[in-house]
Amino acid sequence: MILLSELSKSFDGGATCAVRDVSLDVGGGETLVLLGASGCGKTTTLKMINRLIEPSAGRIEVDGVEVRERDVLDLRRSIGYVFQDIGLFPHLTARENVEIVPRLLGWPVEKRRERSAELLQLVGLDAEEHGGRLPLHLSGGQQQRIGIARALAADPGHLLMDEPFGALDAVTRDQLQRQLIDLRAALRKTIVFVTHDLFEAIRLADRIGVMNGGRLEQIGTASDLMERPATPFVAELFDHARRQAALIGEVR
Amino acid sequence: MCRWILALVVLLGGSPAPARQVETIRIGAKNFTEQEILGELVAQLIERGSEWRVVRRFGLGGTDLCQAALLAGEIDLYVEYTGTGLLNILKRDVIANPDLAYRTVARNYRLRFDLEWLPPIGFNNTYAIAVRAEDAAQRGWRRLSDLAADAAGLHGGFTSEFMERPDGLPGLRVAYGLAIGRTTDLDPGLMYEALNRGQVDLICAFATDGRLAEYNLAVLEDDRGFFPPYDAAPVVRSAVLARLPRLREVLATLAGTIDDESMRRMNHAVDVLKRSPAEVAREWIEDRLGERPAREEAQERDAGDARGVFALAIERRGEVARKVGEHLVLTALGASMAVLIGVPLGILIHRRDAARGAVLAFTEIVQTIPSLAMLAFLFALYGLLGTAPAVTALVLYALLPVVLNTFTGLREVPRQVIEAADGLGFSSRQRLWMVELPLAAPVIIAGIRAATVLTVGIATLSTYIGAGGLGDFIARGLARNDSRLTLLGAVPAACMAVLLSLLIRFIERRVRRG
Ligand SMILES: Nc1ncnc2c1ncn2[C@@H]1O[C@H](COP(=O)(O)OP(=O)(O)OP(=O)(O)O)[C@@H](O)[C@H]1O
Ligand SMILES: [Mg+2]
């Protein structure tokens, strides 16, 4: 369970306001998708949850405890994080990258090995073929999958995923989305998922939070948003998507 | 096993049967030929005349260093010249009368420094103006006052020291009314050759220099007694004489026994005939004690000249190996301590912006200090000769590449990798050891390589504070104008630099490959 209340973040001594007054809650096992255009404050919000960025104002609770009252390392190790720019360790192999958090937690080697093999398989990579490679020798999509496997490695109850399928082609993206849906069904995790793609949001979300200029415009299920848009921005978002979908219809 | 226990007991101070301690006498010498011969004479006389252990600390870089070493008890005695003691150490004016000069230095040294001047050895290594013998004959120069009339048309070649000393050119100009037309600053090793080749017309020779005998040069008589006396005599710590009174007797053999001509011949044997100071000193002692029939000089010359660098290297391989070993130890100590200090400093300035400016400025300023000045300063600071100040100097010089590369390597670790480490819950120590240092390693190791090569080079200067190494050969070669000796030090040093660089490059590649 993750709860944000009146969360704000400004940079440069107040000159830039990245996040303004955001309040929301994500229930246990729920997937919340934060949706919004580039620069609207999605990444900043995620980073505040695991304390990579300190909020300027407001509260964040994870499982009912204010994050600033928890040991920061414990907190971070208990939350899986998939970074927008992946950030694999270039000097470690794919397998070693996946095993890194268990290593920090002091798991024995065999248990780590077993876990990484399992996870590589889960994200659709071959432990034999890809496990021993350095990130440099993996494709962009393969790197993103390693990033996801790394976030899952210590079996955290919470998952923060920042555009994990960002730079992928539609086919691979579709495949990974499907894997994530399966995975979620199997693992029951609380997930905050960031994207700027409405279709991805609709597909993955239990609820969607639409962000614009640092504010949370509206939060609700996809049908709530579509049928009862609270702001012109949300309405326009769906209109735009509809026009795109119509475009595909015309081709036929 | 037994021996180990015994050693331990001795170390802990509870020696069961204390071995009789052998007295040790440490003998110093400055870094030129005559000093080394004199050092050998003293050393060998003590070795023959007593059971004391002799330690040679030759090649010290200058009068001030020798004096400081005596005062610090780092050496027990060395041979000094009355004029030098008077002008350089006591900062007195010139005293023309040799006896008076000797008595003045002896009294002042005893009172001020607790150092004793033993009786003079006999020769007076003062300045002397030398010209080509054929010029002297043609133009009728015999005495310095004969020069005055021709001075305006002459070209003098003088050491930089002579140009400025009151008992050098400035005084000479006044005493003889000598207005020399043109002067050039020359290295002492090159003056004689320049005069011989006609590039200059007169030089400030040293009265006992062996090269006066080699080239056909004439020394002009100092008819107005201008040049102060530079009578050589051993200077000893009074404490040592009090503890070992027999030392006075052992060294009595030297008193008044070597005249200018004999000293010149011995210098010649080393500088020109390329014989070793130890050998020349031994022959003098054997002659003196009537142990040895006179040898043929001509034979020695042949033997001396025929030896090339390789022959010399083979003949002295034991010594070369020992110097290589010393050099490696200096380099290894210097470089490894620079790493132990420099890498943490680099990490510090990467994490703390506040410390960065000061640390980088310090390491950069250190680089601009001339090596000899640095050595002299560190010697003064430690009050010790040898490895400690030498290694400190090496560490200071090697610091910059290590600190800078550590800092640069860490700064170049990609931002998103650092963020990933933080986000996954690495502690800052784990982030440093598991992410930042491994990624910065190639750059850090490149810095260590630069530091090591630098250290091999600078370690050749350690000779000037008696820390040994290949610099001993180089300095002796330079002092004697003997390129074979210089090469004997320079070539192994260059090889060492190249090999160490290759070795570290190899490690670097292994690290890069992961
Ligand atoms: N460290 C920082 N200093 C100053 N401004 C920042 C900083 N980090 C983010 N910002 C600003 O805050 C705003 C929100 O940034 P954020 O990274 O959260 O956007 P985002 O929604 O993740 O965008 P994208 O979809 O492009 O990743 C942007 O205007 C950005 O320029
Ligand atoms: Mg972002």
Image (cartoon, coloured by chain):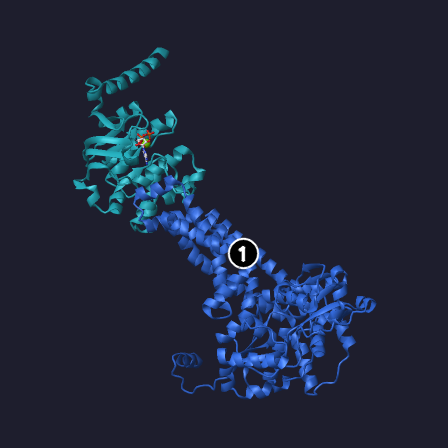
Element at badge 1? helix
Q: Quadrant of residue B100?
A: bottom right
Vertically, is B283 above or below B30?
Answer: below
Of residues A27 and B477, the one nearer the viewer is: B477
In the rendered structure, the answer to whether residue A34 lies left or right of residue B54 reads left
Vertically, is A131 above or below B453?
Answer: above
Q: Is mark 1 within 8 Å of ligand 1?
A: no
Q: Which chain's residue wears label 1?
A: B
Q: Quadrant of residue B468?
A: bottom right
Name the colour assigned to chain B in the rendering. blue
Number of marks in picture: 1
**Pointer 1 residue:** B454
Q: Is residue B313 visible?
A: no
Q: Is residue A123 visible?
A: yes
Q: Amino acid at mark 1?
A: Leu
Which quadrant of the rendered structure holds the N terminus of chain B?
Answer: bottom left
Chain given the colour cyan: A
In the rendered structure, the answer to whether residue A129 lies left or right of residue A222 reads right
Residue A167 lies, in percent from the top left, at 38, 29
Q: Quadrant of ligand 1?
A: top left
Of residues A2 and B14, the one nearer the viewer is: B14
